């Protein structure tokens, strides 16, 4: 079951992230896809803030992963630089541990991702509007997908 939600500006993106955050618990994994500038990092920042992270969240492009503390541990991964790598960075500890994880460019590590996750694709619709295409994998995420709305 796919769900599509269109937001019209950063405020609605922040609200959508807050709604989603209210349903997440460890070891939930959210994957994000979208072109450069689609809003992946903005969405992740809002999600992290809603999960109690107080530090500034920015894209971990050069470090691949950044970890933060909030209501739960929060992992932010940007695996763009792993496009031609088959390096195992301890995925099991990350994805099945005590944290909530957000993975940008997740298709690049498709085989390492947990089967159960929430996949979100963000499409730029012009101006400040974005389309969020949300696809759940697993019963837990189907319930979350059904419950979230603006």
Image (tube, helix red, strand yellow):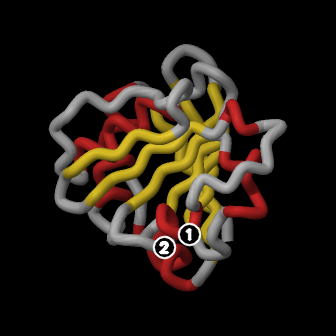
Disc assigned to residue 92 = 1
Whole-number angstrom distance, CA of label 2 to CA of label 1 = 6 Å
Q: Can residue 109 be spotted in the picture?
A: yes
Mark 1 neighbour class, 10 Å CA radius: few under 14, some 14 to 19, many 20 or more: few
- Foreground pick, 138 / 125: 138
- Foreground pick, 5 / 107: 107
**Residue 73 quadrant:** bottom left
Reading the image, the residue beneath label 2 is 96
At 23% from the left and 42% from the top, the residue drawn is 49
* Secondary element at tag 1: helix
- Foreground pick, 61 / 51: 61
Mark 2 neighbour class, 10 Å CA radius: few under 14, some 14 to 19, many 20 or more: some
- Foreground pick, 34 / 78: 78
Look at the numbered discs 2 and 1 and tell me whether their residues touch, using CB distance below 8 Å.
yes
Q: Is residue 80 above or below residue 4?
A: above
Q: Is residue 134 above or below residue 66?
A: below
Give x and y (percent) for residue 109.
Answer: 73, 52
At 60% from the left and 80% from the top, the residue drawn is 138
Give x and y (percent) for residue 86.
Answer: 79, 50
Disc assigned to residue 129 = none
Side of 119 relative to 65 (left or right): right
Q: Is residue 113 above or below residue 105?
A: below
Q: Can residue 8 be spotted in the picture?
A: no
Residue farthest to the top?
Answer: 127
* Secondary element at tag 2: loop
At 34% from the left and 70% from the top, the residue drawn is 98
Give x and y (percent) for residue 148.
Answer: 41, 63
Side of 63 relative to 46 (left or right): right
Residue farthest to the right?
Answer: 84
Give x and y (percent) for residue 110.
Answer: 75, 57
Which quadrant is home to the N terminus? bottom right
């Amino acid at each position: 079951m796919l769900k599509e939600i269109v937001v019209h500006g950063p405020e609605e993106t922040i609200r959508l992230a807050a709604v989603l955050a209210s349903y997440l618990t460890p070891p939930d994994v959210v994957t994000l896809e979208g072109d450069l500038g689609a809003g992946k990092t903005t969405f992740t920042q809002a999600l992290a803030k809603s999960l109690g992270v107080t530090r500034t969240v920015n894209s971990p492009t050069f470090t691949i992963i950044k970890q933060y503390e909030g209501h739960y541990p929060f992992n932010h991964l940007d695996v763009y630089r792993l496009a031609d790598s088959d390096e195992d960075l301890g995925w099991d500890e990350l994805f099945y541990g005590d944290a909530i994880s957000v993975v940008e460019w997740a298709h690049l590590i498709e085989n390492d991702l947990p089967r159960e996750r929430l996949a979100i694709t963000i499409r730029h619709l012009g101006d400040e509007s974005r389309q969020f295409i949300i696809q759940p994998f697993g019963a837990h995420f189907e319930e979350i997908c059904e419950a979230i709305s603006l």
